[in-house]
Amino acid sequence: MKFNRSLGLTIVAAALVTAYGCGKEEPKKADTPAASAAPAMPEAIVKIGHVGPTTGPQAHLGKDNENGARMAIDDANAKNIVIDTTVNRNGKPEVIGEVDFSSALTTVHPKAIYLHQGQQYHVERLDFGQRKAYVKRVDVDYFTDAIRYTQVRVLEIAEEQSAAGPAARAHGDVLVRSQVVGFKKIKFFTNENVGSGKLELPENEMHTTAFWVTLEHELLAGLPFTLSERQSGIFGLVYALASMATLLLMCDRRDLGTAVGERPPSGSADIEWQDFATATGTEKELFEPNLYLYDAYPGGIGFSEPLYRVCHVLLARTRELIAACPCDNGCPSCVGPAGDKSERSKEVGLAILERLSF
């Protein structure tokens, strides 16, 4: 084997240039006058790639080609909402934080209670034009939970499998449209609903990935419950599935979004679950709901496929969770607060899980 002399010299030369460059100090820039310095503002942290999210103002994108990444950073920074106190201890406004646009709709909407470093702040006003939320320090015994209507549209199915039930499981790309229409006041420690309010906020749209379970007509028709009880039980079941999924994935509850939608006749169809409320009795009977667990970040962060793979474990553990809960009609530990659902939500959820087998 002959050694290429010219190639060897090139490598040595490159190494010397690199070593010289690494050890060379850059000239120091002249200090600018302190009077002209801009006031310090919180930075928006933007992470690109398949990474596990943490709480805070971060945008997560699945595909990071150079042009797309640069545009994503600019777009995410431009949409962030700055949280500004109406008055601080010195009697002047003060910036206390910054959140991304989609999170702002649920955390700093008007009349929300925003928690920052253990202190409560009441949101007085949300100004989309100035990208600012104005808050006032308060001391109350409740927190707020946004009421959001969500519609999921299947764009592409990556994998799908039918199973006994009859039912089906799948994962793929979806388009999520959501809108915050109100909020609830939840009391600390007891989780009691102590009030509510209506909101009119803009619709938010996101392309992400999702895992879903389809409950076919034959399965639902065989349940010994009324239509309203079935509907309530389905929402309770998706609540419990999301709770167990966060444990299996070891993620934060806010990293997963949930929705219930009608199974579309094709991947491009767009049908809303809210149509269930206005449909006739016959149309309701023919509905086949999809129970969606989707990644709550643009582009997805890799949760949907693992959930598809361990679907049987997810269903079994969810059934154990609901069955072992000592409550009578539902609670935040299993199918959600009983006051928001039918008294038979637990029964319906367990009946559905007993019929599913993947």
Image (tube, rainbow, N blue to C red):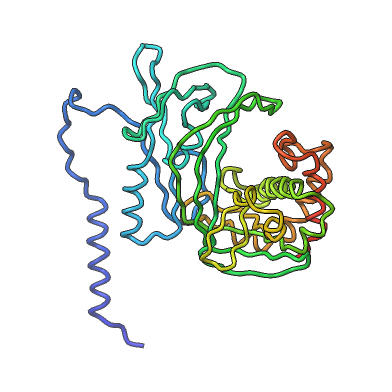
Q: Is residue 291 left or right of residue 15?
A: right
Give above or below for 235 relative to 87: below
| Outermost residue, top side | 90
Near-viewer residue (73 or 201): 201
**Could you tell me which quadrant the N terminus lies in?**
bottom left
| Outermost residue, bottom side | 1
Give the total number of marks visible in the rendering.
0
Residue 307, image x, y percentages: 64, 58
Near-viewer residue (104 or 16): 104
Near-viewer residue (182 or 39): 182
Residue 130, image x, y percentages: 31, 32
The residue depicted at 81 percent of the width and 40 percent of the height is 325
Q: Is residue 36 left or right of residue 328?
A: left
**Could you tell me which quadrant the C terminus lies in?**
bottom right
Give above or below for 291 relative to 76: below
Residue 153, image x, y percentages: 53, 58
Give above or below for 207 relative to 78: below
The residue depicted at 49 percent of the width and 50 percent of the height is 177
Give above or below for 194 relative to 70: above
Q: Is residue 77 left or right of residue 217?
A: left
The residue depicted at 75 percent of the width and 56 percent of the height is 315
Residue 270, image x, y percentages: 53, 59
Near-viewer residue (186 or 345): 345
Q: Is residue 291 left or right of residue 79?
A: right
